[in-house]
Amino acid sequence: MYRHTLGLALASLPVALAATYNVEVGAGGQLAYDPPYITASAGDTVNFIFNPKNHTVTQSSFNTPCVSSNGFKTGFVPVSANTSSADLPVKQFTVPAGTAPLWFYCGQTGHCGQGMVFAINAPADPDPHSFSAFQKLAIATNGTGSSTHATTSAFSTPPPQHWQTATATVTAGGSTWTTTYTSYDGTPPPTPAAQPVDHKITVGADGLLAYNPPNITASIGDTVTFEFHPKNHTVTQSSFSDPCHAVVKSDGSSGFKSGFTPVAANATSFPTFQIKINDTAPIWGYCGQTGHCQQGMVFAINAVESSANNFEAFLEIAKNSGNSTSTGTATSSSTTSTSTDKSGALGLQFSPRFSLVALVIGVFSAALL
Ligand SMILES: *[C@@H]1O[C@H](CO)[C@@H](O)[C@H](O)[C@H]1NC(C)=O
Ligand SMILES: *[C@@H]1O[C@H](CO)[C@@H](O)[C@H](O)[C@H]1NC(C)=O
Ligand SMILES: *[C@@H]1O[C@H](CO)[C@@H](O)[C@H](O)[C@H]1NC(C)=O
Ligand SMILES: *[C@@H]1O[C@H](CO)[C@@H](O)[C@H](O)[C@H]1NC(C)=O
Ligand SMILES: *[C@@H]1O[C@H](CO)[C@@H](O)[C@H](O)[C@H]1NC(C)=O
Ligand SMILES: *[C@@H]1O[C@H](CO)[C@@H](O)[C@H](O)[C@H]1NC(C)=O
Ligand SMILES: *[C@@H]1O[C@H](CO)[C@@H](O)[C@H](O)[C@H]1NC(C)=O
Ligand SMILES: *[C@@H]1O[C@H](CO)[C@@H](O)[C@H](O)[C@H]1NC(C)=O
């Protein structure tokens, strides 16, 4: 009898603990969530109470605080200044299973860059993935003075590049093509290789969790052949700011991926995966096998060494992107692929007369860059 009662009490414990948190969004006209962060358990409810102005609550990831991860989003919630507090709109969020930190920001122009961010279960300072580190990164990446680096105790993410998109209409040989390409300071103009070259990169050679070489330059029209050595690796395109997740391009399509390629330890021939270089803008990639990216198994093609977004910086972000639930970026985030730096979303539109078009574009780009 005693035992039975105790069992019941224990069974009801999780229900008793489910909590509701009220978070004011923009109260008193401030660009802030109040409280700015909470600690919550799976199943708890967060009520976001929208005060006057026009804010959002949008889920992001630690490394890209002001970019939607395609997780939770309220959309814009405009509230007029004379709305009484009883009538403020409320949006609910239910904390999902797992204790991984969750990151959010306001998507209204300029708000995130002024530090309007929120977190659930962020580790406490001085952890490099604390709430204050996240807020600093938001201000550093999207603030008005965003050329200054965000400094967390572990690493700093370089500022975003100044991208430009150019569209050129080219008439040659009686035909007309329109082509769009993107570039940033220091990126070579999109000129084709005189003679296309095939670049070889080994994947996991000698049992190392590495691409070799990890960091190459290639011209338009060149190919890159990845050669898989024993173990079970992938070649997956990502983006500078989110090295360990497959990129989702701005048009919703994905980048290149080889899929898992298991190779026996005694194999004598090695399978390959080839990509073609369509643009001189940087290409970033990683091995999708559990833990490999965080151990530095990443590569870059046409990274600009003199830029803040160089291969070393990319490698550093990969190593810091976390393996465990204490770091927020690695867990439950298969949907958090973002490409703030657009480096996955590039491409000359191909035509059968590609080399001719690209050649003419080279002239255009020389003027534009
Ligand atoms: C923050 O900056 C990134 C990169 O420039 C941009 O894609 C994103 O839209 C910005 N976010 C906000 C909320 O302005
Ligand atoms: C709220 O902000 C969004 C984005 O800036 C804008 O498109 C929308 O028109 C605004 N709504 C109101 C009612 O001001
Ligand atoms: C709030 O003010 C607007 C104009 O400023 C008015 O149209 C609206 O009726 C007011 N709403 C309330 C609830 O008083
Ligand atoms: C990446 O390539 C550049 C240019 O070849 C080189 O200067 C740099 O040292 C390389 N970085 C690494 C980590 O290999
Ligand atoms: C390769 O790795 C993937 C992902 O971990 C796994 O699903 C697959 O079974 C592995 N293949 C072999 C042959 O080990
Ligand atoms: C590799 O080893 C497996 C079993 O360990 C064997 O079945 C296979 O024949 C070997 N292959 C080669 C190429 O030696
Ligand atoms: C280049 O374009 C081809 C054809 O559109 C595409 O299959 C390939 O993945 C592109 N290469 C890269 C590196 O994106
Ligand atoms: C991730 O795990 C690898 C190996 O287990 C370790 O070398 C690396 O430091 C870890 N990274 C983080 C951020 O915990």
Image: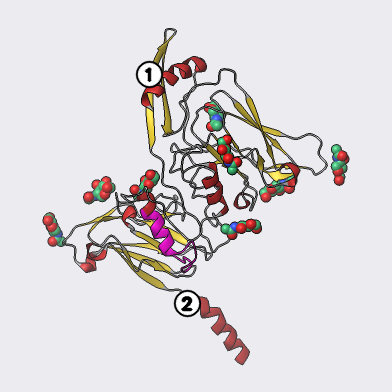
Task: Work out whether mark 1 precedes mark 2 in sequence or the reverse, and give the earlier one.
Answer: 2
Q: Which residue is mark 2?
A: 17
Q: Nearer the viewer, residue 13 or 148?
A: 148
Q: Position of residue 217 (x, y in %)?
A: 56, 31
Most extreme residue toward the bottom, as rendered? 2
Seen at 32% across and 50% down, the residue is 145
The picture quadrant where one finds residue 272 is top right
Instruction: Indicate whether 269 appears above or below 108.
Output: above
Q: Is residue 23 magenta?
A: no
Q: Position of residue 16 (x, y in %)?
A: 47, 79
Residue stretch in magenta: 119-139
Q: Which residue is mark 1?
A: 169
* Residue 124 visible in the displayed image: yes
- The disc label shown at residue 202, or none: none
Q: Is residue 124 magenta?
A: yes
Distance from disc 1 to disc 2, alpha carbons, whole Å, reads 63 Å
Q: Position of residue 348 (x, y in %)?
A: 47, 26
Q: Nearer the viewer, residue 294 or 76?
A: 294
The amino acid type of the residue labelled 2 equals: Leu
Q: Position of residue 223 (x, y in %)?
A: 61, 27
Callout 1 environment at 10 Å: few (<14), some (14 to 19), or many (20+)? some
- Circle 2 — which element? helix
The picture quadrant where one finds residue 74 is bottom left
Callout 2 environment at 10 Å: few (<14), some (14 to 19), or many (20+)? few
Kindly tell me whether mark 1's CB lies below 8 Å from ligand 7: no
